[in-house]
Image (cartoon, grey):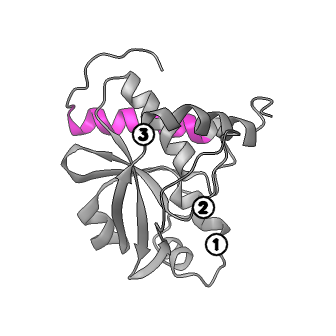
Amino acid sequence: MKATAPLRMILPEELKAAFSKCAVDALATFPKTAGQCVALCAYISARLTEDSIANRVALGSLSCNGVKTFQYKKPISVAPSGSSVWDGHAWIEFPDGVIGEPSLFRTAKAFPKHSSLRQNLEAHGLIDRGAILISASDALKDYGLKYRQRTYLKEAAFVPLIHGLMAINELINHE
């Protein structure tokens, strides 16, 4: 990672524009993101940090209408290949309780049609929507999504995860 300017607080409209641009670019670059929430968040977080936007990749559990969808049971382990096997969920946290959710709406499309998550997100027209920026309280109130942060991803894990994401999307020959 290259050296960046000190992180700064930005206005909500600037945050929306910056997150939207990074997320749209990432989702276009990496069409295969199902199950890759950690790597996708690492990629977007690195880009936002390069632009001096304060953020962190949160790791934890996600419930939908009280049903655990992703359960954080143990810390993530990043293999040398850049792949990871993990059962939790990742998202990007910004100051003031704002959540950047870049992968859930693609991943949910791969869930069985009868799953609580898929049914709930389909009812709200969110399947395949792309990324969303929302306050944690609105996520629960409007969509029944409850994020429970357990830890934060260390920046040292970003590069192998991003390389793994690139390999999955056949952008590099990763052995």
Residue 6: x and y in percent read 25, 20
Q: Is residue 17 visible?
A: yes
Circle 1 residue: 111
Q: Residue at x 19, y 31 (%)?
A: 9
| Side of 13 relative to 89 (left or right) | left
Alpha carbons under labels 2 and 1: distance apart: 7 Å
Q: Nearer the viewer, mark 2 or mark 3?
A: 3
Q: Which residues are magenta?
A: 10-27
Circle 2 residue: 107
The mark that comes first in sequence, 2 or 3, is: 2
Viewer-closest of 31 and 35? 35
Circle 3 residue: 154
Q: Is residue 175 above or below residue 126?
A: above
Amino acid beneath label 1: Phe
Amino acid beneath label 3: Lys
Q: Determine the image quadrant of residue 8.
A: top left
